[in-house]
Amino acid sequence: MLGTAITIWAAFQNFGKFNIVIALAIATIKATLVVLYFMHARYSPKRTQLVIVCSVFWLAIMLALTLADYDTRPHEGRLASANTCYHA
């Protein structure tokens, strides 16, 4: 209930450019609590915990590569015109 209340409170606040950062931080904390306690990962065998840590690490690698690719693309802020569309 506290997580839902914090999420609703944050949704109605204006944090400027940090809105998405705060929303993702709240979502990460809530997801971590779900995995640790509701999925019983906190009290599971060490091998299961290792699989969870490795999967989160792999997700971080994939997100880093995606963001690195996104960073190399031009950010013009406009839609593509008819001249830039390629037809096969």
Image (cartoon, rainbow, N blue to C red):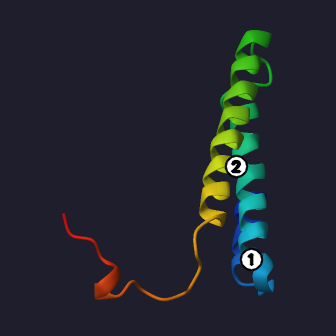
23, 18: nearer the viewer: 18
Residue 64 at x, y percent in the picture: 70, 49
Q: Quadrant of residue 42?
A: top right
Q: Label 2: which residue?
A: 64
Whether 27 is drawn above or below 83: the answer is: above
Which residue is pictured at 48% across the width and 89% down the height?
A: 78
35, 3: nearer the viewer: 35
Quadrant of the snapshot with the N terminus: bottom right
Q: Nearer the viewer, mark 1 or mark 2?
A: 2
Question: SS for tag 1?
Answer: helix
- Which class describes the residues within 10 Å of circle 1: few (<14), some (14-19), or many (20+)? few
Can residue 1 be seen by looking at this rendering?
A: no
Residue 58 at x, y percent in the picture: 67, 33
Question: SS for tag 2?
Answer: helix
Which residue is pictured at 76% across the width and 42% down the height?
A: 33
Q: Label 1: which residue?
A: 19
9, 84: nearer the viewer: 84
Residue 88 at x, y percent in the picture: 18, 63
Which mark, by number, is residue 4?
none
Q: Give the amino acid at mark 1.
A: Asn
Dot 1 or dot 2, earlier in sequence: 1
Q: CA distance from mark 1 to mark 2?
A: 20 Å
